[in-house]
Amino acid sequence: RLQQAQDQARKLQAERDDMAATLKQQSLELDNEITELDRKIEKAAAKDKARWQDRRKRLTGYRDELNADLKRVGADMKDGWTDFKNTTAAKMEKIAADLKQE
């Protein structure tokens, strides 16, 4: 019984570590895209500038959400882990699709 509990705890920790690494990677991708948008905004004509600024604002919001999720992964989250994991995975898929668009 103790062995089973320890195995379950190790499995949960491995899932958390994997989730944290994935969140950090996507946050880095967002940072890179935001940096690229800053360059585009600097050089853009007025009509394009608004579009790039809207995209930058959206991506910055995503990044902030991911950073908040990353903090939650580090918390002692026994209850609700599955829901959190599923919600976060869906959010990351949406962000990945958005990053591929432009």
Image: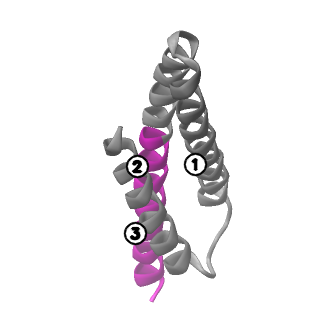
Residue 9 visible? no
Between residue 48 and residue 30, name the one nearer to us.
48
> Is 23 on the left or on the right of 77, as rendered?
left
Where residue 6 sits: x, y (%)? 46, 74
Residue at the disc numbered 1: 62
Q: Find the distance from the CA under tag 1 to the CA under tag 3.
A: 28 Å
Q: Is residue 8 magenta?
A: yes
Question: Which residues are drawn in magenta?
Answer: 1-26
Residue at the disc numbered 2: 98
| Residue farthest to the top, as pictured | 43
Circle 1/circle 2 CB separation < 8 Å: yes
Instruction: Identify the residue at image location x=62%, y=39%.
Output: 60
> Is 69 on the left or on the right of 28, as rendered?
right
Where residue 38 sits: x, y (%)? 56, 19
Q: Quadrant of the N terminus?
A: bottom left
Check disc 1: other Cα within 10 Å, few if <14, some if 14-19, many if 20+.
Answer: some
Which quarter of the picture shows residue 100?
Answer: top left
What amino acid does circle 3 point to?
Lys
**Quick one: label 1 or label 2, which is nearer the N terminus?**
1
**Quick one: label 2 or label 3, which is nearer the N terminus?**
3
- Circle 1 or circle 3, nearest the eye: 1
Instruction: Identify the residue at image location x=64%, y=46%.
Output: 61
From the viewer's perspective, is residue 7 above or below residue 44?
Answer: below
Q: Quadrant of the C terminus?
A: top left
Instruction: Identify the residue at image location x=45%, y=74%.
Output: 86
